[in-house]
Amino acid sequence: MSVMDLRVLAERIPLVADRALVEIVNSTETAGHLADHRAGEGFFRRLWSKGTGADRKREVQGTQALARAQRLTVDLVRDLGEHLSFTNLNVALVSTRLDELARETEDSGLLARQSLGEVSELASVVASFMDITSRRLDAVEQRLDTHAALLDVHAAALLELERRQVHGELWQNSRDTVDALMRKWRTYGAYRSLPWPVQALLLARQLAAGKPGEHEAATGDREWRERLTDELLADPGYGELREALGWRERLPLAALLSHVLAGLPGADDRLMVAELLGAGLPPGLRPPHGPLALVTARTLELAVLRPQEQQAHLIHQARQDTFAECLTRPGAMTAQEFVRWAVEEQADAARAARGRVGRGLAPGGPGTLPEAVADAVPVPDPVGEGSV
């Protein structure tokens, strides 16, 4: 798939730009990684492999093949940056991973160090995607933290004034971002080709990873969450979903997941949505998993891996996997509870990821939301519901 093809797909499903960038960086391999490449490839990894010829190049061991593949990676990321836009959280996560990769490469042998120039250049290209306002906020906060004891009252007041100005810009950017995405969704059909529950999850995920989530992390203002929730509850698709499922009170999770599977009959579409929800990525390149998004992604993945298996068994296994990773799992819920859970879960996951990147910590742990975050919207899992 070419960058032009990716642009066309991104018009319908904007988050594919983020996932494509992450997949490219996740596929950046040093010589020591070549032998560890796994045979199974996901939807976006296949797109990258076809676009760069990396699937063929992996067969060639040695410096020349490695350098050529990484040169193509840098060029492809430059091309993506010219035609697509990315959420700032995604850029931050990718930049953090590239910094780690550069350190790993420096510590490796001579052959691996030959790729350090390409890795460093790729890190520079990705860093250029970061919004100027984000950089200003980071600079102001760093100066306040580092020099607080040395600043006189006048200098501190000026910095505080600048921080308020940046916060005001973030607030405006947040509102503009929500307005633009809602217009693309309502008027131009972004995400509309997907089942409505998936639309809700991806809209929340995109806004949480973009300017609204950044403004919330900087100021604590959660206005965008209520705005998106109201937009989703007022959408005609919400009413159509309730009518189609007879969703008057609490609906078993299995019925909702079956509806998602029916709306995505093709294996590629199922795998694409699963990966947009974070499937197939290490914790450092995605926000923490939330139980609602994870059970949806896992159900879609299993449906691709086991096409002949009964849906009830697939959903049961997905719920078990979700509980094992998140220590909680969604149960029966009302339609309004689903919408609120979807928004809150994605917002809290992005905020947790921003905190991790902001502290400069190496990503680690299981990559799941803390229990308090997972339970932000109390939806019980009644006895018996867990059996599908």
Image (tube, helix red, strand yellow):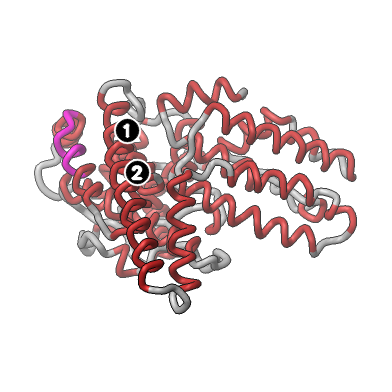
For the point 43% across and 55% down, the residue is 137
Query: Contact (CB < 8 A) between labels 1 and 2?
Result: yes
Instruction: Give the class, few, some or many, for how many residues have Cα within 10 Å of label 2's Cα (few <14, many ≥20).
Output: many
Q: Which residue is at 78% across, 33% downward?
A: 56
Q: Is residue 77 above or below residue 122?
A: above
Instruction: Please tell me whether mark 2 sits on a helix, a strand or a loop.
Output: helix
In the image, is 269 to the left or to the right of 378? right
Residue that extends furthest to the bottom in the rendered view of this protein = 149
Residue 208's mark? none
203 w.r.t. 191: above or below: below
Q: Where's residue 360, x and y in %?
A: 54, 65
Q: Is residue 62 magenta?
A: no
Residue 240 in the image, given as x and y percentages of width and height: 17, 29
Q: Residue furthest left?
A: 248
Helix, strand or loop at mark 1: helix
Which residue is disc 2 drawn over? Answer: 207
Instruction: Categorize mark 1 by other alpha carbons within 10 Å: few (<14), some (14-19), many (20+).
Output: some
247 horizontally vs 386: left or right: left
In percent of width and height, residue 35 lies at 80, 51
Which residue is drawn at the image coordinates 17% and 45% (left, top)? 335
| Of the image marks 1 and 2, the number of the one nearer the N terminus | 1
What secondary structure do most residues of the magenta stretch adopt? helix
- Amino acid type at mark 1: Leu
Span shown in magenta: 229-236
Amino acid tagged 2:
Leu
Q: Is residue 307 visible?
A: no
Q: Is residue 233 magenta?
A: yes
Q: Which residue is mark 1?
A: 181
Give the percent coordinates (x, y) of residue 275. 49, 42
The image quarter in which residue 194 lies: top left
